[in-house]
């Protein structure tokens, strides 16, 4: 996309200037995101079932007397940025490290992603629930929608739009937030690509949302095929998670309309590397990619708690990957990017001045003022708290074994839709 060249040209030039500690340095941006605080919510039935599932899965791991020292070892590897050592070691010991990591961090993130997928209507997007069925919006979600519309109106007014133009844009935005009824022409299969999803948090969360939605799915629904892409050796653990989901929600095991999880191991950026020193944003050939982003059945791409890591690994290759997704994905595909708000300042240029991740992504994917990019923003939040529901920690830690604390998360969230 042309705007990637202009907006991120400094990123391309400064691709090797990442500080050794991996943190954003330099002068701070003047933009300060407003925190969208939320009080702890009640523990939903779906969330409780997911935590119970994970508790059963990781109970032997937490009961082990080596859990705590192994966790400290894994933390040390991650602190030293030895990610492949922590997650890619092909041995019984390496599998143990991955299980300990997942037992510690997957439950809390699963809770967060389950709420995000529900709020954003993932079940409707994938054809497993129709408008007006299933969970109604909470009062908090209704208030957030009203705030979004108010922000949209202010921005359009600042851009000099007329009252009629503003009304038309707002109406279209509200229509997107309320998906239309499904037609009778339901595809046999829809695809989801989850980048950096080896540990399985977003996979489990989506499976839970779809499993809960199946109770309302009186109409024919498509089979959902998830491709979880990661460098680490997460295949064994993902198989256990998929099987656990199917046991908890038998509808997910349906031959015709089930929930499949394929693990794709490899470096998603490896096919986006070029020998040229030019900062021009090119794209790889389709045959060289790990996954096919041009599939007409693609509905959703997620990059959760991964985009900052990809940018640190290689800014140029990350931008080329985003460009390729933008050029390849069919119209209507949604792109969900979630990142920790503590990692959402990106250094640009030789001086290392930092800019908000969300702002840069919006400009690159949706176009600057007066321009039209490949994507449009469906939902935007630069500092939203997702707090653990009351009782969540008790459900996961039921029984004996090491106690695991489930932390709240403050995130940057962007949901885009392909034009």
Image (cartoon, helix red, strand yellow):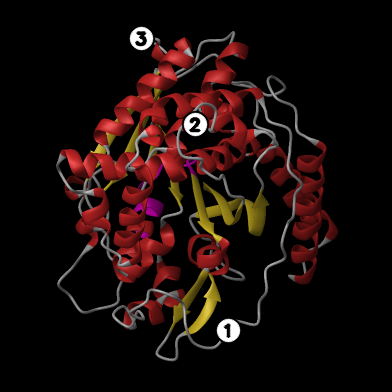
Q: Residue at label 2?
A: 206
Residue 140 visible? The answer is yes
Q: Count the marks.
A: 3
Q: Position of residue 67 (x, y in %)?
A: 36, 43
Pointer 2 and pointer 3: residues touching (CB < 8 Å)?
no
Closer to the camera in the image, 388 or 34? 388
Other residues around mark 1 within 10 Å, as few (<14) / some (14–19) / many (≥20): some
Q: Residue at label 3?
A: 255
Residue 281 visible? The answer is no
330 drawn magenta: yes
Kindly identify the residue that appears in the image at 29 percent across and 60 percent down.
77
Pointer 1 and pointer 2: residues touching (CB < 8 Å)?
no
Q: Going by the image, does 5 lie left or right of 354?
A: left
Closer to the camera in the image, 343 or 357? 343
Q: Position of residue 262 (x, y in %)?
A: 29, 31
**Quarter residue 391 falls in:** top right
Closer to the camera in the image, 295 or 110? 110
In the image, the segment drawn in magenta is 323-334
């Amino acid at each position: 996309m042309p705007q990637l060249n202009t907006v991120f040209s400094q990123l391309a030039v400064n691709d090797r200037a990442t500080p050794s500690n991996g943190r954003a340095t330099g002068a701070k941006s003047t933009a300060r995101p407003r925190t969208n605080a939320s009080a702890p919510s009640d523990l939903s039935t779906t969330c409780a079932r997911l935590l119970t599932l994970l508790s059963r899965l990781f109970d032997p791991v937490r009961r082990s007397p080596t859990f705590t020292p192994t966790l400290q070892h894994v933390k040390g590897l991650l602190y030293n940025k030895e990610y492949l050592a922590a997650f890619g070691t092909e041995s019984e010991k390496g599998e143990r490290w991955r299980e300990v990591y997942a037992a510690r961090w997957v439950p809390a993130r699963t809770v967060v992603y389950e709420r995000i997928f529900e709020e954003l209507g993932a079940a409707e997007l994938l054809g497993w629930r129709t408008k007006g069925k299933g969970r109604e919006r909470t009062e908090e979600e209704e208030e957030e929608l009203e705030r979004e519309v108010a922000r949209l109106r202010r921005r359009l007014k600042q851009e000099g739009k007329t009252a009629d133009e503003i009304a038309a844009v707002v109406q279209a935005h509200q229509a997107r937030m309320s998906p239309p009824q499904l037609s009778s022409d339901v595809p046999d299969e829809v695809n989801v690509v989850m980048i950096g999803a080896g540990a399985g948090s977003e996979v489990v969360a989506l499976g839970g949302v779809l499993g809960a939605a199946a109770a309302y799915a009186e109409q024919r629904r498509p089979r959902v095929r998830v491709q979880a892409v990661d460098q680490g050796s997460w295949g064994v653990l993902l198989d256990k998670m998929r099987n656990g989901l199917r046991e908890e929600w038998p509808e997910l095991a349906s031959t015709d309309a089930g929930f499949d999880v394929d693990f794709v191991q490899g470096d998603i950026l490896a096919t986006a590397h070029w020998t040229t020193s030019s900062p021009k944003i090119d794209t790889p050939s389709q045959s060289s990619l790990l996954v096919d982003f041009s599939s007409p059945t693609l509905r959703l791409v997620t990059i959760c708690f991964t985009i900052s890591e990809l940018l640190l690994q290689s800014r140029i290759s990350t931008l080329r990957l985003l460009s390729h997704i933008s050029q390849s994905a069919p119209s209507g595909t949604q792109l969900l990017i979630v990142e920790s708000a503590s990692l959402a300042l990106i250094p640009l240029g030789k001086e290392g001045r930092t800019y908000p991740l969300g702002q840069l992504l919006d400009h690159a994917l949706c176009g600057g003022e007066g321009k039209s990019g490949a994507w449009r923003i469906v939902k935007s939040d630069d500092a939203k708290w997702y707090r653990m529901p009351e009782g969540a920690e008790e459900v996961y830690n039921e029984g004996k074994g090491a106690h695991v604390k489930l932390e709240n998360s403050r995130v940057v969230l962007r949901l885009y839709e392909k034009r």
